[in-house]
């Protein structure tokens, strides 16, 4: 990715896919990579179940010419075209300028497209990405996108344009329970789409990194040791299907930030209160008891489960 972003004239562009549980740092890493690998901009889009082709290719809108006051229809450029053509020479209307041979003119750094939660989008929408994820055979060549919703207009991209996909689903999803270890998606993805976005990097939770984060935020060896023990016990219960909610790295960061806030205000049992405020609203009634028991075991604080006021629960 570093070679493709900074040395695009001599290195082929690349597609990369991140796969792993939620809150483990996939999104954070993609943004950092975009900045450190020399890209001019990171375009981000998020997959969702109600996505349509317009979300990717752009949608037609009606505008009024100020001089003639006549209405006309034009295509509002979608995120794919914006990301592909970033760093290319353009005219006053934002159209890519071509030389006499029909080739693009590079003016600046390429962009990276980061497509997060791709597995949440319908397969029939994602398969349209097959065009732009087709990597050219040689360095310095452009990927192409044919806009059927704009008269078949061909968009040529920056030679250094790269794509990162990120999702919680391992494989196509839905076809095999082992592929749904991270999320129960609504759509099975097409193999031809996934085959174009490789290599694949498998993510997990980095306990050593999490401990460093906790030490940096809390600066308390005893409290951090209890937090590490608590995280391990909750994750073990998740693996054993005793709880349904997984404590992610992102969740740990949020808990630690709230611990610091409550500690500054001298709340009693501030660590337990922070865990409760951060996590318990997302728990089902069945698993809330297991979380409460684990808190009691690790922190020796009894958490009441019920409709009592927040102040009375801890």
Image: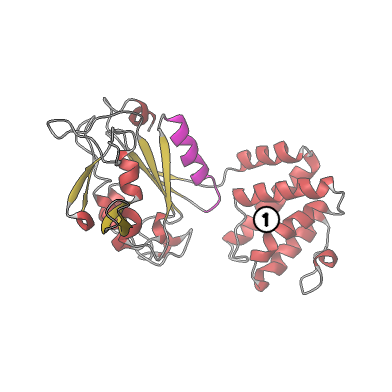
Expressed as whole percent of the image width and height from the top left, the position of residue 251 reads 63, 52
Q: In this rendered view, identify the residue nearer to me: 175 or 266.
A: 266
Residue 161 visible in the displayed image = yes
Q: Is residue 258 magenta?
A: no
| Chain part drawn in magenta | 22-37
| SS category of the residue bearing label 1 | helix
Task: Name the image quarter holding the N terminus.
Answer: top left
Looking at the picture, does residue 125 appear above or below residue 66? Answer: below
Residue positioned most to the left: 101
Q: Residue at x 26, y 46 (%)?
A: 132
Q: In this rendered view, identify the residue nearer to me: 237 or 306.
A: 306
Q: Magenta part mainly helix, strand or loop?
A: helix
Expressed as whole percent of the image width and height from the top left, the position of residue 45 reads 42, 51
Task: Name the image quarter holding the C terminus.
Answer: bottom right
Q: Residue at x 69, y 68 (%)?
A: 288
Question: Quarter of the image holding residue 69?
Answer: bottom left
Expressed as whole percent of the image width and height from the top left, the position of residue 157 reads 26, 39
Expressed as whole percent of the image width and height from the top left, the position of residue 134 reads 24, 44
Question: Quarter of the image holding residue 299?
Answer: bottom right
Residue behind mark 1: 233
Q: Residue at x 81, y 69 (%)?
A: 309
Residue 126 visible in the displayed image = no
**In this rendering, position of residue 82 left or right of residue 26:** left
Q: Residue at x 72, y 69 (%)?
A: 289
Q: In this rendered view, identify the residue nearer to me: 239 or 164.
A: 164
The colour scheme used here is: secondary structure
């Amino acid at each position: 990715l570093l070679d493709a972003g900074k040395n695009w004239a001599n290195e082929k562009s690349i597609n990369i896919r991140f796969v792993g549980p939620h809150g483990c740092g996939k999104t954070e890493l993609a943004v950092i990579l975009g900045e450190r690998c020399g890209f001019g901009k990171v375009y981000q889009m998020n997959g969702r179940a109600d996505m349509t082709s317009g979300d990717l290719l752009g949608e037609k809108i009606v505008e009024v010419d100020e001089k003639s006051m006549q209405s006309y229809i034009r295509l509002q450029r979608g995120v794919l075209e914006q990301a592909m053509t970033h760093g290319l020479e353009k005219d006053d209307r934002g159209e890519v300028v071509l030389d006499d041979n029909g080739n693009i003119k590079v003016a600046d750094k390429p962009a990276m497209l980061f497509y997060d939660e791709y597995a949440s989008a319908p397969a029939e929408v994602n398969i349209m990405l097959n065009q732009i994820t087709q990597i050219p055979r040689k360095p310095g060549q452009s990927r192409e996108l044919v806009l059927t919703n704009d008269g078949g207009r061909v968009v040529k991209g920056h030679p250094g344009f790269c794509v990162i996909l990120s999702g919680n689903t391992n494989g196509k999803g839905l076809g095999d329970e082992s592929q749904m270890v991270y999320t129960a998606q609504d759509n099975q993805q097409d193999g031809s789409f996934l085959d174009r976005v490789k290599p694949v990097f498998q993510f997990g939770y980095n306990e050593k990194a999490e401990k460093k984060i906790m030490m940096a935020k809390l600066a308390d060896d005893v409290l951090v040791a209890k937090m590490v023990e608590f995280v391990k016990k909750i994750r073990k219960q998740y693996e054993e299907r005793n709880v349904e909610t997984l404590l992610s790295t992102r969740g740990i960061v949020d808990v630690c930030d709230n611990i610091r806030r409550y500690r500054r205000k001298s709340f009693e049992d501030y660590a337990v209160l922070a865990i409760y405020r951060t996590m318990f609203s997302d728990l089902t009634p069945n698993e809330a008891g297991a979380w409460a028991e684990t808190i009691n075991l690790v922190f020796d604080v009894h958490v009441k489960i019920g409709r009592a006021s927040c102040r009375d629960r801890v």
